Amino acid sequence: ANHAAGGTYNKFANGVGRVPVGIGSKRKRIVVTGGAGFVGSHLVDKLVARGDDVIVIDNFFTGRKENVVHLFGNPRFELIRHDVVEPILLEVDQIYHLACPASPVHYKYNPVKTIISSHCTNVMGTLNMLGLAKRIGARFLLTSTSEVYGDPLEHPQKETYWGHVNPIGVRSCYDEGKRTAETLAMDYHRGAGVEVRIARIFNTYGPRMCLDDGRVVSNFVSQAIRKQPMTVYGDGKQTRSFQFVSDLVDGLVALMEGEHVGPFNLGNPGEFTMLELAEVVKETIDPSASIEFKPNTADDPHKRKPDISKAKDLLNWEPKISLRDGLPRMVDDFRNRILNEDEGKGN
Ligand code: NAD
Ligand code: UDP
Ligand code: UDP
């Protein structure tokens, strides 16, 4: 571990670790790192509604206060502006670790800076949260990604597949960072007995997604609302499987509360080409929407679809919302934010 950070920790640890917290009350104290982001803020809503005390740690790299502003003033909710790369002292029962600079736009635009920040967050951030979990005996859930499978040679992907990642490719800063985070989690589980849970999340969409982070669903939906052509990269025949955010949140909670370490694929097995996705967006938002082809990026996975039998069997979880049902549920949120942005520009 990092010695400076380790030193800081040793000052606090002092043998008082493993005091079980929350005894005598059913209410849990839960940390959500990255809780001001897209997935995190929906997770926080669910936990607060369930009656838990939730502390969000976020540095607002891609997250926004707007995502959690409706919880300000709620005594069960606390927001800490903090970079998980720095150590932190808290007493909680569970840690959902979502913090991650996850935007493809950033890593394609400035790969070296993104690698550094991505690796710092995935490695040092995960290490700190695992160190915290170890000290206080909290359960720790890592949100890993289907990107650990790279451009997969096995289809659909099972959790037993080790992946096909190009270590020198443009995407590797993200892929390899998450692979390292998984390794760290398993090392703390095996070596220090930390109760670990690992989710491998497949492409997820819904309200509060970043408008301009370059992901395909947010791009197509924003473009269709703005009356711009939807940008299809490559021939548009590559596939992805799109999961609505509330299904993912249910899966994350089932995983955290269950008895299995994982990893578990959490995704919707419905598989679509990008051309088919464009068609669904067109039907949902604007029948006159058009598409425009653009060159694809290097190492773009050709297909991706989760095998979710393990999560079905062991977590009793499966997604409920199809793409056609889910897309309309994000459109109002996108329209409102695009309208606000446009008004902002006019001022
Ligand atoms: P997001 O960008 O909306 O959320 C990430 C949050 O982490 C943001 O609020 C950001 O400000 C925060 N953050 C980043 N670096 C931080 C740091 N150093 N310290 C504190 N906070 C930091 O992304 P999301 O889509 O909500 O993703 C959440 C998690 O799920 C990520 O770990 C991501 O890798 C994983 N995931 C998401 C998808 C998807 O399709 N959305 C797919 C696979 C995996
Ligand atoms: N850590 C933290 N909060 C804690 C306990 C640990 O942020 O309550 C950090 C600590 O600073 C260290 C990391 O977690 O950088 C790993 O801690 P661990 O005790 O596993 O390793 P060590 O400090 O012994 O190297
Ligand atoms: N993509 C696209 N148009 C866009 C953005 C992305 O056709 O405007 C394609 C991209 O090439 C990839 C797929 O959509 O094949 C999913 O891309 P995204 O960045 O959303 O997710 P990931 O590649 O991480 O699965």
Image (cartoon, rainbow, N blue to C red):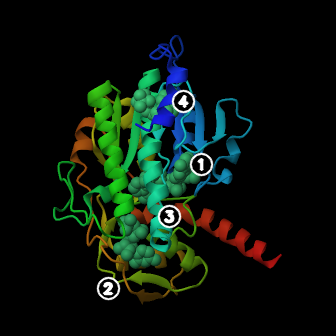
Instruction: Using a 10 Å C-alpha cutoff, classify the residue at mark 1 as few (fewer than 14 neighbours), some (14 to 19) or many (20 or more).
Output: many
Which of the image's four quarters has the N terminus?
top left
Type of amino acid under label 2: Asp
The Cα atoms of the two marked residues, 2 and 1, are separated by 35 Å
Q: CA distance from mark 3 to mark 1?
A: 22 Å
10 Å crowding of disc 4: few (<14), some (14-19), many (20+): few
Element marked by disc 2: loop
Choose between 148 and 41: the one closer to the eye: 148
First in residue order: circle 2 vs circle 3? 3
Query: Which element type, helix, strand or loop, lies under badge 1?
Result: loop
| Disc nearest the viewer among 4 and 3 | 4
Tell me if label 4 and label 3 are in contact, CB under 8 Å: no
Residue 36 is labelled as 1
Report x, y in % for residue 174.
39, 59
Residue at mark 4: 8
Label 2 – label 3 distance at C-alpha: 30 Å
Label 2: which residue? Answer: 235
Using the rendered image of the protein, determine whether residue 195 is visible from the camera's viewpoint: yes
Mark closer to the observer (4, 1): 4
Who's the residue at 46% across and 50% down the image? Answer: 120
The span from disc 4 to disc 3 (Cα, nearest Å) is 26 Å
Residue 298 point in image, percent of width and height: 33, 77
Q: Amino acid at mark 3?
A: Lys
